[in-house]
Image (spheres, rainbow, N blue to C red):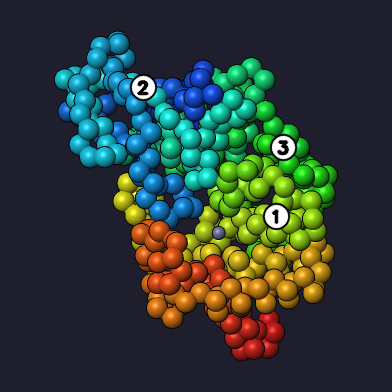
């Protein structure tokens, strides 16, 4: 987008700058999990501007009611005059305009949802998935955005987004890129490496029994394997974010980054390291499978209502099926370890009573309302496990019918 701007006449460049949606997040009370956000929207001539916070975040197909963390909402025009507003549904603030005006809103965010991988602030860091922090308006969703962080002096900020004027400021092509490019800022370990002319970063927040060199050595091998399946890499730069913590586990894929959470004591043993690398491979595969192609129903993201699909089993299952294949091909995993994991996938699938109640397609569609627990175990299948096994069967079928091609 910035290259494109360079080719535009000067007047259009200034228009584009004027049209930016600007976000600022100030963190002055990290120990209370609080951040203060201000958003400046371009001039609007509408009678009112509807401003929303997403109800869910990318990669997690579950309604999270994120507007429940918003306090002290306020709206003014560009001259500082207070604008009237009202909430019209749980996630939408309607700001009324008497005259065309630039709308500035401010509010406080309570960010204490580490395990949801959406928003967390404490005295050592903040994890910022824009879905949980930054409001948008449909009117300006396609406009360029700029995000400025005002955070404690010693903190380091890292994101898949490009840096702007300084090390705590980022720019993105539009809101959709912003919400798919989380920011990790805080006290962290940070490493950079290059493989085949592409740049990679590893940022680790938290203490744990990890060996960063061992992780870096295997990530360098992993990122070479993209060409085993795809011809092109969809990024120039990719960021692996890791939370070594006691309170969260899991991972999420994003446009050109991933966030991986693990218990701080589960890095050292070989099986733990391999499990970490399987997760890293899974999220890396998603960079193509989901972020660059995906079931039709998943985009454009609605943010406020669910995006339904009965093919999530394919998105997640084929990704799970391929993760150990990449590790085996890269020489990170041995053959016996590969088959041990495959055996475990089959056993865990067979041990789930719900596989006889719902199909993989039905569970995919119902992902938005599946609460897990005993009911989930007995009523739904696991789209990762069953999806991986269906993907393996499809792969074998394709290999047989194409004479191994
Ligand atoms: Zn996944």
Side of 55 relative to 388 (left or right): left
Q: Does label 1 or label 3 sit earlier along the sequence?
A: 3
Q: Does label 3 or label 2 sit earlier along the sequence?
A: 2
Instruction: Determine whether the beta carbon of the residue marked 2 sits less than 8 angstroms from the nearest atom of ligand 1.
Output: no
Residue that carries the numbered disc 1 in the rendered image: 276
Q: Nearer the viewer, residue 151 or 94?
A: 151
Q: Nearer the viewer, residue 398 or 312?
A: 312
- For the residues carrying marks 1 and 3, which lies nearer the camera in this image? 3
Give x and y (percent) for residue 61: 42, 55
| Mark identifier at residue 106 | 2
Q: From mark 1 to mark 3, how far is it between C-alphas?
A: 16 Å
Side of 292 relative to 269 (left or right): left
Residue drawn at (35%, 43%), measured in percent from left and top?
65
Residue 10 vs 280, above or below: the answer is: above
| Mark identifier at residue 207 | 3
Q: From mark 3 to mark 2, how far is it between C-alphas?
A: 34 Å
Residue drawn at (63%, 33%), measured in percent from left and top?
158
Q: What quarter of the picture does the C terminus occupy?
A: bottom right
Q: From mark 2 to mark 1, how far is it between C-alphas?
A: 39 Å
């Amino acid at each position: 987008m910035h290259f494109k701007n360079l080719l535009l006449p000067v007047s259009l460049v200034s228009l584009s700058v004027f049209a930016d949606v600007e976000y600022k997040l100030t963190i002055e009370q990290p120990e209370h999990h609080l951040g203060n956000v201000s958003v400046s929207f371009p001039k609007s001539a509408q009678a009112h501007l509807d401003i929303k916070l997403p109800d869910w975040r990318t990669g997690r197909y579950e309604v999270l009611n994120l507007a429940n963390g918003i306090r002290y909402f306020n709206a003014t025009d560009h001259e500082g005059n207070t604008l009237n507003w009202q909430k019209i549904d749980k996630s939408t603030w309607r700001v009324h305009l008497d005259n065309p005006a630039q709308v500035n809103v401010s509010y406080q965010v309570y960010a204490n949802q580490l395990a949801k991988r959406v928003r967390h602030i404490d005295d050592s860091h903040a994890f910022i998935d824009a879905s949980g922090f930054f409001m948008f308006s449909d009117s300006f969703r396609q406009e360029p955005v700029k995000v400025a962080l005002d955070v404690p002096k010693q903190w380091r900020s890292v994101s898949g987004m490009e840096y702007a004027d300084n090390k705590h400021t980022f720019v993105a092509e539009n809101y959709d890129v912003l919400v798919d490019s989380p920011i990790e800022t805080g006290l962290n370990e940070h490493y950079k490496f290059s493989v085949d002319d592409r740049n990679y970063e590893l940022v680790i927040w938290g203490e744990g029994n990890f060996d960063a060199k061992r992780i870096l050595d295997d990530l360098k091998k992993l990122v070479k394997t993209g060409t085993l399946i795809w011809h092109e890499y969809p990024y120039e730069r990719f960021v692996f974010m890791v939370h070594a913590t006691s309170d969260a586990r899991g991972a999420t894929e994003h446009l050109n980054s991933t966030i991986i959470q693990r218990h701080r004591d589960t890095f050292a043993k070989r099986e733990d390291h391999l499990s970490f690398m399987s997760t890293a491979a899974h999220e890396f595969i998603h960079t193509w499978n989901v972020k660059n192609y995906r079931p039709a129903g998943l985009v454009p993201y609605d943010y406020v209502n669910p995006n339904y699909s009965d093919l999530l089993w394919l998105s997640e299952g084929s990704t799970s099926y391929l993760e150990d294949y990449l590790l085996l091909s890269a020489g990170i995993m041995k053959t016996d370890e590969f088959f041990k994991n495959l055996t475990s996938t089959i056993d865990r699938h067979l041990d789930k009573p719900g596989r006889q109640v719902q199909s993989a397609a039905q569970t995919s569609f119902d992902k938005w309302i599946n609460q897990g627990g005993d009911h989930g175990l007995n009523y739904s299948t696991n789209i990762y496990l069953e999806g991986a096994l269906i993907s393996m069967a499809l792969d074998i079928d394709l290999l047989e019918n194409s004479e191994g091609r």
